[in-house]
Image (tube, grey):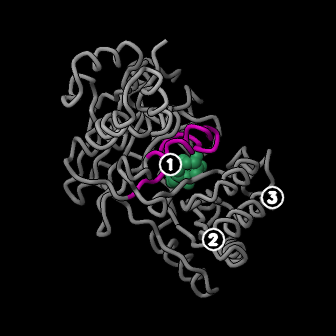
Amino acid sequence: MKEDIRELYFDELSERLVSMGEPKFRAAQIYDWLHKKKASDFSEMTNLSKGLREKLSESFYITGLRPVSVLCSKLDGTRKYLFSLGDGNVIEAVLMKYHFGNSVCISTQAGCRMGCRFCASTLDGLKRNLSAAEMLSEVYEIERDTGERVSHVVLMGSGEPLDNYDETVRFIRMISDGRGLGISQRNITLSTCGIVPKIYELAELRLQITLALSLHAATQEKRLATMPIAGAYELSSVLSACRYYTETTGRRLSLEYAMAKGVNDTDEDAELLSRIAGRLHAHVNLIPINPVKECGFSEPQKAGIEHFKKRLEGLGTNVTIRREMGRDIDSACGQLRRRYMIDAGLCTD
Ligand code: SAH
């Protein structure tokens, strides 16, 4: 069976090449083609002999993602990509332009099995995990398409990164490797719904990434009403794991809080949230919920969100309202993919 060459760490690639009888420096050349020049075929590797290129293509293949559609915002340059994986599954990734650089939001799974009640990506369940090479290719394809450097990566597209732990860690290590794109780990944010044992495992790796917890409710009872994962891991144990993460890595925690009208937007919610943020020294990101037709949630009025923010600030909490990007190409996260799957007859409804 052929192996995906883009999936290999530099050292693994070196080992493979040495065992093929190649000199050590070949690994640097090939890694450069794969991860800096973003080659999609061995024939592009023009500083290798034809013989070696042929030998490589007998043992390896290179992951490719095919852009199916790209939506571009005229307001702020946001670009939403729908990519087709080799096996017909589709995933979304989004490029957002900020004053500090270009940030890409990538998917870690095709679909998701976490079942959060407000989320479009989980409606049709998990199709499969993405490989690290596929995650890398999301970023590489976007760089190829725009001709611009990506400086930040957020793992906030479809899927639960900690439910695809090994490949996600491999992705983080490879994208931050200076022999490839070399994106600083401090510019990488991993968002999780709170898989407790994996948060502890991740802490032990002492990566310098930012951890974002999708909190969305400040009590166990309320959280359980929208996030089934809370049935497996109580809020108190998720918060202890997050505390351990910040203490072990020295990195600050972000708390994601998607606000839904009449669900988690009262003054009492603000007080409880501020207590949690205070104990963890965390930053709160308020996100006006993106209404998804099948889910039945709506966002509070702008004034309500502002009031909630003021209330938090009054209690000493560090908080921002997440700016909506690409409002003119607005489709809530996951909906581009879902619409495509419905049209292709891949969804049940
Ligand atoms: N599974 C991970 C990462 C993917 S979801 C997680 O749960 O964090 C990325 C973020 O988008 C999460 O905070 C998630 O809760 C949020 N999200 C999902 N659906 C949303 C919606 N309809 N409106 C606003 N945020 C949403």
Type of amino acid under label 2: Gly
Check residue 164 for magenta coloring: yes
Q: Position of residue 148 (x, y in %)?
A: 22, 52
Upstream in the sequence, badge 1 or badge 3?
Answer: 1
Q: Relative to residue 318, is residue 2 depicted above or below?
A: above
Mark 1 vs mark 3, CA separation in Å: 25 Å
Check residue 42 for magenta coloring: no
- Looking at the image, residue 178 sits to the left or right of residue 202; the answer is left
Q: Position of residue 124 (x, y in %)?
A: 56, 29
Q: Position of residue 257 (x, y in %)?
A: 58, 62
- Chain part drawn in magenta: 152-174
Q: Position of residue 215 (x, y in %)?
A: 65, 59
Q: How many marks?
A: 3
Please identify, in this view, whether the residue under mark 1 or under mark 3 is nearer the observer.
1
Q: Residue at x 47, y 70 (%)?
A: 321
Magenta region's main secondary structure? helix
Q: Nearer the viewer, residue 233 or 332?
A: 233
Q: Residue at x 65, y 71 (%)?
A: 266
User: Which residue bears the numbered disc 2?
Assistant: 250
Whether the residue under disc 2 has CB within 8 Å of ligand 1: no
Q: Nearer the viewer, residue 184 or 217?
A: 184
Q: Specify the quadrant of the image occupied by residue 333.
A: top left
Mark 1 vs mark 2, CA separation in Å: 18 Å
User: Which residue bears the numbered disc 1?
Assistant: 172
User: Which residue bears the numbered disc 3?
Assistant: 237
Type of amino acid under label 1: Ile
Q: Nearer the viewer, residue 7 or 109?
A: 7
Type of amino acid under label 3: Ser
